[in-house]
Amino acid sequence: MTLRMKITRSLAIPVVALTLLSASDRAQAQQTPTKLSAKRDKAYTTLAGEVAHLERQGAILRKVAKLVRPNVVHIEAQKARLGISGRPIQEAGSGVLISFKGKTYVLTNRHVIDNTPLESIKIKLADGRQLTPTREWDDPGTDIGVMAVSAEGLIPARLGNSDRVEIGDFVLAIGSPFGLSHSVTYGIISAKGRHDLQLGNTGVQFQDFMQTDAAINPGNSGGPLISLRGEVIGINTAIASNSGTYEGVGFSIPINLAKNVARQLIETGQVSRAFLGVTLDASFTTADAAKLGIGQPFGAHVTGIQPDTPAEKAKLRVDDIILQYNGVRIEDDSHLVNLVGLSKVGSKGSLLVFRGGKKVVVQVQVGDRNKLTKPRG
C-alpha cells in the first residue's frame, strides 16, 4: 500500500511563509529581474578576478604540455616471440627524443623494444609522421633502451637534473596509456631512492626509482616525467598495482641515470658498472648489529676484502659495517651494491663506516665491475 499525503489548500500559508523571511530575503524577492541580473553579473566579475591568479598558475601546465608534446613519441613493437594465442606479441609504449653529439635518438624502456627486429618497431611522432629506427641498444640492468632515428625537423627534449628533484615537486607524465598517445597527467614526486622492487620478469637489477602519483598506466612505459620547467627529469617505467592499472604509485628512472646509461650504450655498446670489491653478509640482522655494538638495524656488513680492488686500496676491513655511501644511508647489502653499481666508474666517493665501536669516514675510488672475474660488491 502506498501512503499518500493529503494536501490542504490554505491562503494563509504563503503569508506566514513570507513573514518568516529575513529582511534581506524580502528585499531580494521584491527586486526586479533587471536588478537581480545586474547583481549576478557583478558577482561573476568579482569571481573572475579572484580566480585569475589560479588561472595564471594553470596556464603553466598548458604551456609545459604544449612545449613538450613534440619531444614525445608513441612506440609500437611487434615482438619476435609468440604469445599464448600463437600470434606475435604487440607491445605499445612511449619514448622521448634526445640529442647526443648532434644526432637524435629515442630514449625509452628496454622492455618496450626488446626482442623486436628494427623493421618491426614503429615510432610515431607528434606531427603524425612514422619512423623506423636505424639502430637499437638496451641495458637489462636498468631497463633503458635507446634507438637511433633520422628525419627532418626532429625536436629533442631538454633534459633536467634529477639530482635536484625534491619530494613534493610538481610533475607531468606524458605518454600513451592504453594506446592514447600524448596523454598528459599531473602529480607530485612522492618519494625518491626506491629499490628492491619486484618488476615482473624484467630483472631490473640496478634500481634508484623516483615515485610519483601522476597517473601512469600500460603504454606510459618509456615516456618522460616532466618538471614544471618543461625539462625531462625521469623515464616512466613501472607501477605498483593489484589491478595492473593506475593506483597512485608509479616509478620513474631518474634522467641522470638514464642519460649516463644511454651515453655509454651509444658510445661503446655496453654499460660499465662500478664496484668496491667487498664480500657482504646477506643475512646481516639486527641481532648481528647488536653483537658488533652498532645498535641499529641497517648497514652492510663486510665479511671479505678482495685483493687489488678499490676496497683494499681504501683500507676497508673485515667486520666493517658500511652505514652510508656518499651521504645515502645504506639499508642492507643489496642496497649498497645497487648504489655503487649506479655510480660512474672511476668516481670518488665517501663511506661512513662503523669500525671498532666508532664511526669513521673512508674515501674510495670505485672501479670497473666488468673487469672483475667474479664481481661480488
Image (tube, rainbow, N blue to C red):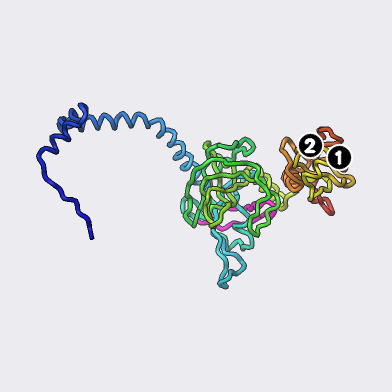
The quarter in which the N terminus is drawn is bottom left
Q: Residue at x 53, y 38 (%)?
A: 170
Q: Residue at x 61, y 53 (%)?
A: 109
> Which amino acid type corresponds to the residue marked 2 in the rendered image?
Leu
Region of the chain picked out in magenta, as a range: 130-149
| 260 and 151: which is toward the camera | 260
Q: Residue 73: in sight, yes or no?
A: no
Nearer-the-camera pick, 5 or 47: 5
Residue 78 appears anywhere in the view: yes
The numbered disc on residue 329 is none
Q: Main secondary structure of the magenta part?
A: strand
Question: Pointer 1 and pointer 2: residues touching (CB < 8 Å)?
Answer: yes
The mark nearer the N terminus, 1 or 2, is 1
Which of 223 and 137 lies nearest the eye of the viewer? 223
Q: Position of residue 118 (x, y in %)?
A: 61, 61
Q: Amino acid at mark 1?
A: Leu
Residue 15 in the image, given as x and y percentages of width and height: 13, 34
Q: Is residue 46 above or below residue 165?
A: above
Q: In the figure, is residue 223 to the left or right of 343? A: left
Please tell me which residue is depicted at 80% across the width and 38% down the height of the picture. 294
Query: Local crowd at mark 2 within 10 Å, few (<14), some, or many (≥20)?
Result: many
Secondary structure under the numbered disc 2 in the rendered image:
strand
Judged from this view, the residue extending furthest toward the left is: 11
Snapshot quadrant of residue 287: top right
Residue 26 location (% of width, % of height)? 18, 29
List x then y, in percent, for residue 273: 75, 48
- Residue depicted at x 13% and y 46%: 8
Q: Secondary structure at mark 1?
A: loop
Which mark, residue 351?
2
Instruction: Residue 316: give its label.
Output: 1
Mark 1–mark 2 Cα distance, whole angstroms, equals 10 Å
